[in-house]
Image (tube, coloured by chain):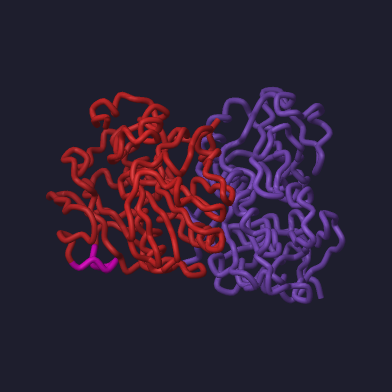
Chain colours: A red, B purple
Amino acid sequence: MKTDFGTMLKLTSKEVRQLIRSGQYTSHTAGLGKGKLQANLAIMPEEYALDFMRFCQRNSKPCPLVGVTDTGDPNMGTLGHDIDIRTDVPSYFLYEEGRLSGVGEDITEIWREDFVAFALGCSFTFEHALISAGIPLWHIENDTTVPMFRSNIETVPAGPFSGPMVVSMRAIDERILPQVLEICRGFPLAHGAPVHWGHPKKIGIADISRPDWGDPYPIEDGQVPVFWACGVTPQVAIERAKLPICITHKPGHMLITEVADTAEIPIVA
Amino acid sequence: MKTDFGTMLKLTSKEVRQLIRSGQYTSHTAGLGKGKLQANLAIMPEEYALDFMRFCQRNSKPCPLVGVTDTGDPNMGTLGHDIDIRTDVPSYFLYEEGRLSGVGEDITEIWREDFVAFALGCSFTFEHALISAGIPLWHIENDTTVPMFRSNIETVPAGPFSGPMVVSMRAIDERILPQVLEICRGFPLAHGAPVHWGHPKKIGIADISRPDWGDPYPIEDGQVPVFWACGVTPQVAIERAKLPICITHKPGHMLITEVADTAEIPIVA
């Protein structure tokens, strides 16, 4: 039996994770497990793990590393004492040779002894902080997906990993832009300060009304388009690297951790 | 011919690095290359690099990773376009099987194709920020080395790397403690906020007047002892891991990068 979203909103992070683990909740995690860090996920053979960590270190705005497992160990102990990476994400994408080859809700059957799992910080953290500071976000109020674009900003390559930085866009009132920059800079593990604002063409975006992923986002008078480094960047890098096998979360279907989303470091107490 | 410290203080980071590279300066780097990020260094065979990166990720306060080379490549391109890790540190320590076996000023002869070099953020960055904010630091005014202690705080292990967190201590006026915490939290790549203040015994320090490394630091009336995670932590972990070979900087003799020490991310423009 599936659990509906309204019920899920009232639950603790631990309760949400248990329903996800048992297959009773398989949808997106926006707004769930209030106050806890949510993370993007990437799982790959150990053979590629050192280069992927180098890629994350060199591109820490799009790829802020918040956790990494021991090789073959499905527990992400630094992010929660009971996290099993094979079952605790609502929906997974399987990639083979860089192509999406499957979607599933449990990867226990395909977990391997040479797998390493990486958790990467996500935008939910700074969005939560902006809303808490009284800064409205149109896409959340209107239940749409934030628009994402391939930019002309190149990532710093590492081994097989490279490619364009993907950016997400939110329209912000010009008057509060300094406050937004200041708040976001305080979350280096959630993409940090925006990478650009004001001039989409300067970062290679020809038409702001046609995102590569997600939904359009209106820009009102007095607002500027603001661009943040986006967690889709490592997914594009992983696709381009054409790894024989790689597993990620399905976008929006994140790992909910036990770490406070305002924590200075991503280590569970 | 060696260059004296007074002359060094007036030079740019690039000029300092060139004198270090040519062997004309081999002493400590405190105060040099003003405004540029300085870094601790650890070099080891690739075989241990993934575990060491995991150790840094899991212990980001003592081990804030700011750069990592490709395997066998002595250039640390993300921290400066001309950095050669084999020559650009004033003095190196060589460890074999966990024991200090040599000291040198150039490691070109022992560099190997399987080496990976790591740069880790250091306390100079937040000390510089505190002094800029008008907060005096006794050890700098008196030209002593900050006291460092083995604490009873355990690091999160990764592969062969484990051990106690080493902490550094500075006495701070109680009234400005909140300001100090706030400033330091803004430098996550330079140990971030202190890990403890007030009660040395609670973190396993029996006698504050007898540091394990460095010099004693007086605590005046109205001051509290404040403890920061320290970059000696990874050195202790490396010694305990008994790697067949590992090279670090000689304490205080850091890598001077081309990245601003207030930069949000450690990537040279």
State the residue lying farthest toward the left: A221
Q: How many marks?
A: 0
Could you say where residue A86 lies in the image, as x and y percent from the top left?
45, 44
Extent of the magenta region: A200-206
Q: Is residue A169 left or right of residue B150?
A: left
Q: Is residue B10 left or right of residue A187?
A: right
Instruction: Pick the residue in front: B184 or B167.
Output: B167
B230 vs B105: above or below: above
Q: Is A201 one of the magenta-colored residues?
A: yes
At 38% from the left and 33% from the top, the residue drawn is A22
Which residue is pictured at 82% across the width and 31% down the height?
A: B209
Q: Residue at the far right: name it.
A: B101
Q: Residue at x 64, y 30 (%)?
A: B196
Q: Find residue B17 and report its image quarter.
A: bottom right
Is residue A122 in view from this perspective?
A: yes
Q: Quadrant of the N terminus of chain B?
A: bottom right
**Can residue B138 be seen?**
no
Task: Looking at this view, name the residue that lies furthest to the front.
Answer: A109
Q: Does A38 appear in magenta?
A: no
